[in-house]
Image (cartoon, rainbow, N blue to C red):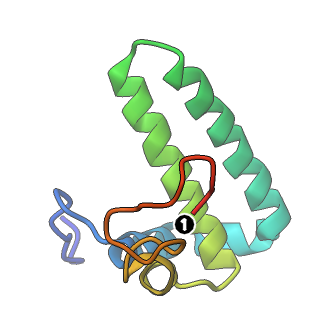
């Protein structure tokens, strides 16, 4: 039995996930670098695209998880705190209109 306490995985924050991914993979990820890690991320995005066209909900959930994990991995290698980045960009609402419920025109990217 491991002596490391395991967080309640039924609800994990980006900060917790980023720390867990860093602990598990950082040495390998750093050696691969941002460019190599980005290529793995893009492969996972492609797998997500395929899963979105299918009907297997379990596979779809796994591919979403993989995409998030690889995105977190890139953030670790690039030394970006995702929790802080998310708070800075979206913590006060839509970055376009500033409202909690976006009122930007549909044709605009907020």
Q: Residues within 10 Å of mark 1 (few under 14, many from 20)?
A: many
Q: Quadrant of the C terminus?
A: bottom right
Q: Secondary structure at mark 1?
A: helix
Residue depicted at 48% across the width and 68% down the height: 21
Which residue of the protein is positioned furthest toward the right in this rendering? 35
Q: Residue at x 82, y 59 (%)?
A: 36
Looking at the image, residue 6 sits to the left or right of residue 22; the answer is left
Q: In the image, residue 22 lies at what x, y percent?
A: 51, 75
Q: Is residue 59 left or right of residue 82?
A: left
Query: Is 8 placed above or below 27 here?
Result: above
Q: Nearer the viewer, residue 85 or 47?
A: 85
Residue 54, percent across and down? 49, 13
Q: Which residue is mark 1?
A: 72
In this view, 58 is above or below 39: above
Residue 57: quarter of image: top left
**Quadrant in which the N terminus appears:** bottom left
Q: Residue at x 78, y 69 (%)?
A: 34
Quarter of image, res 32: bottom right
> x, y (%) of residue 70?
59, 56
Give x and y (percent) for residue 94. 44, 71
Determine the residue positioned at 71% across, 39% down: 43
Q: Nearer the viewer, residue 9 or 94?
A: 94
Left or right of 54: which side holds 32?
Answer: right
Q: How many marks?
A: 1
Q: Is residue 106 left or right of residue 27?
A: left
């Amino acid at each position: 039995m491991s002596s490391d306490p395991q967080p309640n995985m039924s609800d994990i924050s980006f900060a917790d996930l980023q720390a867990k991914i860093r602990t598990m993979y950082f040495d390998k990820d750093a050696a691969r670098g941002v460019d190599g890690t980005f290529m793995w991320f893009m492969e996972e995005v492609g797998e997500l695209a395929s899963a979105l066209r299918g009907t297997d909900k379990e596979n779809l959930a796994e591919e979403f998880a993989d995409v998030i994990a690889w995105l977190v991995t890139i953030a670790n290698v690039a030394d970006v705190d995702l929790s802080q980045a998310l708070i800075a960009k979206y913590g006060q609402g839509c970055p376009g209109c500033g409202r909690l419920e976006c009122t930007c025109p549909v044709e605009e990217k907020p």
